[in-house]
Image (cartoon, coloured by chain):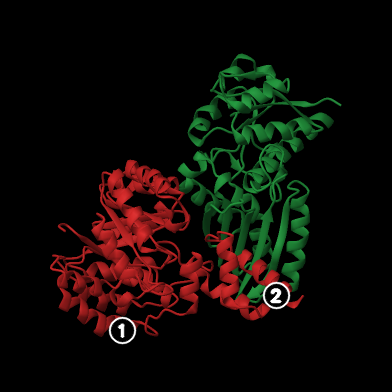
Chain colours: A green, B red
Amino acid sequence: MNKIKVAIIGTGNIGSDLLLKVQKSKYLTCGLFTGRSADSQGLKRAKEMGVPTSTNSIQAIIDNPESCEIVFDATSAKNHLEHAPILKKLGKFVIDLTPSRIGQMCVPAINPDIAFAVDNVNMVTCGGQACIPLAKVIMDTHPDTEYIEVAGSIASKSAGAGTRANIEEYMQTTKNALEEFSGVKKAKVILVFNPAEPPVNMHNTIYATIPNLNIDLLKEKIESKIEEIKKYIPGYKLTLGPVLDKGRVVMMVQVIGSGDFLPPYAGNLDIITCAAVHVAEEYAYYKLIK
Amino acid sequence: MNNLKFFDSTLRDGSHAVSHQITADQIREYCEKIDGSGIYTVIVGHGNGLGASSHQVGFAVIKDAEMLAVARKALKKTRLGVFLIPGFATIKDDLQPAIDIGVDVFCVGSHCTEADTTQQYIQYLHDNNKEVYGILMMYHMTTKERLVEEAVKMQSYGARGIIIMDSAGSSTPSLVTETISHLVKHLDIPVGFHAHNNFGMAVANSLIALQNGATIIDGTIRGFGASSGNCQLEALGTLLKKMNIESGLDLYKMMDVSEQVVAKIMKKPQEIDMIGLMGGLTGVFSLYALPIKRAAEKYNVDVRDIYTELGKRNIVGGQEDMVIEVALQLSKTKNN
């Protein structure tokens, strides 16, 4: 079977994890792995795998537009501002893993078809990917719910310099996406960096104050949504609830990473690379059968 | 000792002790009476700081903005301060509104090894010409060398001072001596200390910090605070007077506030119980007290054994699930 070629901009942890996932895919192959730094470990590894590489970042795509149909941007929000118009001109389908929020937000368990409607999708945040589908279930089954809160805990070791320098963007993007996708009036986001050793797995607690609660209905719908999410995020797991505790509904989900490039505790990074590759695969599958 | 600054966390740390139920009237009365006492800043808010009122750590009885507006009106001479932890507070929803209300002093905190999570927030305040301090919590969990590295980061973002928090009340006098003198030697900005009283040492450790070059002491009136409470500011002030050290504090005023206002807010006298002692001994964060008590009851194991095991595992904030795991394991060992 033919494969659709992708380019990955950004040769750090996220870029390297994307590369391994793309190379395992039935529908995708990496046509270009490109960054800025010549001594990047990620670039070296890609070269050893026989993947075409470049240190000219986006210029490599401009110079050789045939290298890809899909582009993953795993750089930074600031860089994506510059990349987005160039890629649009080149007619590429762009999957943005930065918190730039230029493209339409995409959570595969909710709006997978967005990939066929627009040319730039944004993968929100790890907390968003983990919690938004469940918040949407709460709102679909209990539309009178007025407040949903999500508290995420991630291992310090899994939070790179980029995450740490952009907490504000993380918090605002996650909150806005929660409100927009689920329709809840007010969402609150909490993020805890956990420095414990050995590193802890990513987990998220979702709280909601729900009037006229039908816990059996909620449980049933949550459990079926979890199965749906597991199809593209294998390490996604409901560890508690939904249960009624002190007048509020509580549930916890844990994400254990696939361990492709990043260690299993970095479920927060895995969830977003899994979701991004899933979107690319849907797009590629559609192209290939057409 | 010149230019000592006393930070007053009574309403903030004390908030933990009453499950964040401090009312607007209590804040107003406290601020009116403490105003002009020589305290540098009165820090007001939820125990976990701005934006923390939540299911996760407990809802406060009133909104941050209301607390700050009431305090702002009542404080004429003493500066109004806030505390915040990135991950709870955001610039847009919490910090900018606090700036707009007229807060004077900002304390931005992180776990002792995570100073880079404060960068956006300290820089934002610095760029807006606000007086901002960096707070390193749970300091006993790392080395003094690492604390300097983290403090230097905060200094580079624009912090005007660094306050070391003994969040678990786990300090020994020698740890305070070593840590504070090392930081004072390696930083260009003032160093402060926030003590907890798990070993009945909060005032003593604060004095030791001062003797080793700290110039900021963060404490509370009547010792009101989480777990075993804090450095009792009026006690430290009186001790300094006895030692003929000028503190600039109006002790009568502080004693009056302690008797007339804080005693009424407190639900019980600040005491050192078994939980406090075990917390200090094992270095387990004071906010685990309740989950540990619950788990001990549920699985019929000794609270102290849970503390000991959690201490061995170096538990940090946000690992409530480990409390259950440990309790369950202890109960299995016990029954075998």
Residue B285 % position (x, y): 49, 65
Which image quadrant: the C terminus of chain B? bottom right
The label on residue B57 is none
**Viewer-closest of B306 and A136:** B306
Residue shown at 52% from the left, 57% from the top? A189
Residue B228 % position (x, y): 41, 75
Q: Residues within 10 Å of mark 2 (few under 14, many from 20)?
A: some
Q: Residue furthest front?
A: B174
Which image quadrant: the N terminus of chain B? bottom left
Q: Is residue A74 left or right of residue A228?
A: left
The label on residue B263 is 1
Residue B322 % position (x, y): 63, 64
What is the secondary structure assignment of the residue under circle 1? Answer: helix
- Residue B197 versus residue B139 in the image, above or below: below
Residue shown at 28% from the left, 46% from the top? B185
Which chain is indicated by disc 1?
B
**Viewer-closest of A112 and B161:** B161
Residue shown at 54% from the left, 62% from the top? A185
- Residue B277 versus residue B266 in the image, above or below: above
Residue B44 % position (x, y): 32, 67
**Viewer-closest of B318 and A273:** B318
Residue type at mark 2? Ser
Per the image, the residue denoted by label 2 is: B331
Q: Residue furthest top?
A: A63
Residue type at mark 1? Ala
Residue A60 sits in which quadrant?
Answer: top right
Q: Is residue B146 left or right of residue B134?
A: right
Taking the image as drawn, is residue A120 in sight? no
Q: Residue furthest right?
A: A1
First in sequence, mark 1 or 2: give its number. Answer: 1
